[in-house]
Amino acid sequence: MNKTGGKSGNKDCEGGPCRKCPHYAIRTRSCGLYSEGFYLPLQANVIAFCMTARYRKCPVYYRNRTSRGIDGLPGTEDPNHFHGRRRHPRIPEQRGILIQSCDWQGVSNGRFSESALTLDFSPGGMRVIVSRDVPPDTPLRFDFEDDFFIPHFRGIAWLCWYRSLPGDSDRVEAGLVLEDTTSKDRLSRELGYF
């Protein structure tokens, strides 16, 4: 929150969809909607759809939304709303986590560092509570504390949405989408998804 009590940061995510497609991995420049193989969208599609709030109009997204059961995506709807709209159900568990702004190799750049608490998580993302706004449009390194069921679990995420925590104007609830395939795959394996 800024000093006037208003939000600063990613206005396109406030109460609405993500600023970029949650299935587009910036680091690898690949589309995560394909479970078999590796799909690199054309640069024109990346500019027109993947990196904008218009990602739902992407032909690849549109073609896969019904067959993959993703009419809604992690972070694009009410975080408590399920009804088959998520690829994986969220696991409601509170765990300590450190979130830091970083480069695409996961090296912290010192601009943002905040201890947070998860509300829930899945192989696609997590919902956290933090004491200040999470910076939009930057990779975020996450490091779970030692009490997490995967020792030293870390990876790279991206802010998808945020809002003031109901009843607590000093804290923010944020939805993070896991960005790197290594952390997604490891969490999926540990949770028994494959």
Image (cartoon, grey):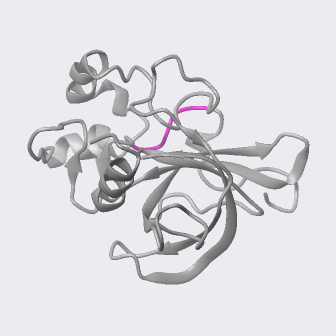
Magenta region: 16-20
Left or right: where does residue 104 sit relative to residue 152? left
In the rendered image, the residue lying farthest to the right is: 167
Image vertical order of residue 183 relative to residue 14, above or below: below
Which residue is found at the position 78% from the left and 45% from the top? 164
Left of 174 or right of it: where is 176? left
Q: Where on the picture, by quarter, is residue 80?
A: top right
Residue 120 image offset from top left, x and y in percent = 61, 45
Quarter containing the C terminus? top left
Q: Quadrant of the N terminus?
A: bottom right
Q: Nearer the viewer, residue 99 or 191?
A: 191
Q: Quadrant of residue 135?
A: bottom right
Q: Residue at x 11, y 39 (%)?
A: 36
Tell me if residue 105 is in the magenta stretch: no
Image: 54 above or below 143: above
* Residue for point 21% across, 60% down: 28
* Magenta stretch: helix, strand or loop mostly: loop
Residue 60 coordinates in the image, percent (x, y): 20, 28
Q: Is residue 17 magenta?
A: yes
